[in-house]
Image: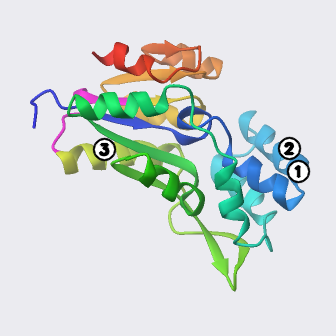
Amino acid sequence: MPSDRKLILLDMDSTFIQQEVIDLLANHAGVGFEVAAITELSMRGEIDFKESLARRVALLEGLSESILSEVRSEISLSIGAREMVEGLHAAGHCVAIVSGGFENVIAPLLDAEGIDYFKANLLEITDGKLTGKTIGQIIDRQAKADYLQELAEKLDIPLNQTVAIGDGANDLGMMAIAGMSIAFNAKPVVREFAQAKIDDGNLAKVLELIA
C-alpha cells in the first residue's frame, strides 16, 4: 500500500447522491410537508439532530418495506461521483460514506458503486412495515467524527491523511478532525469552515483538490 494512502469520507445525502433519502421516503408516506417542517426546525437549531430524526422517522410508521427499493430507484449519484471513486481507488485510496440517512435504502447502492466502508442509521422493520423507529446508534455530528477516527485507526491511516466531504452542519465534526475538509454545494457555515469548496456539484473535482 502507498505510504501516502488517504481515507476519503463523504456525507451521503446531497453530497454523494443528489437527493435526501428521508424526503423520498416521506413523499411515499404522504408526509413530505410535515417532515420538511421538522427538518427546518433542526436547520434553525431549534431541535437537535437526534430529536429531528426521531420525529421524522416516527412519521414513516406503517410504510411498507417494499417502498425502500422504490426509493432506491429514485436516487441519482452526484455528478462525477463514479469518476471520483474510480480515480481515488486507482490512486490506492480508501473511500467511505457516513450518513444520517438509512442503511436499509443505501447499502445495495453503495455496494454496487464499490464503496469500501459505510455507516448509516438503520430503520426498524417488523412484519414488512416500518415501525417508525431506528435501531442502534444514531449517526449524528459526533458519530460521523467518531467514524472517521475509527476507520483511520482501523486502516492505519494518519488523520492528516484523511479527507472529509460534506454539505451540512452535521458534517462539521468530521471536517474538524480530518486532514482536509471539502465543502460540497454546502450551507454557508460549512463553506466558511472548510479548507476547500466545490460549488458546481461535480465530485470529480475532489481528484484535483487532493492530488
Image check: 160 left or right of 116?
left
Residue 182, position in %: x, y?
45, 21
From the viewer's perspective, is 55 left or right of 37? left
Mark 2 element type: helix
- Magenta stretch? 156-163
Distance, label 1 to label 3, CA atoms, is 35 Å
Q: Is residue 209 visible?
A: yes
The amino acid type of the residue labelled 1 equals Glu
Indicate the quadrant where residue 121 lies. bottom right
Residue at image mark 3: 149
The residue singled out by tag 1 in the image is: 34
Dot in front, 1 or 3: 1
Report which quarter residue 51 is drawn in.
bottom right
Residue located 45% across and 34% down the image: 82
Counting labels gives: 3
The circle drawn on residue 37 is 2
State the SS at label 3.
Answer: helix
Alpha carbon separation for disc pair 2 and 1: 5 Å
- The answer to whether the residue labelled 2 contacts the one labelled 1, judged by CB atoms less than 8 Å apart, is yes
Residue 67 painted magenta: no
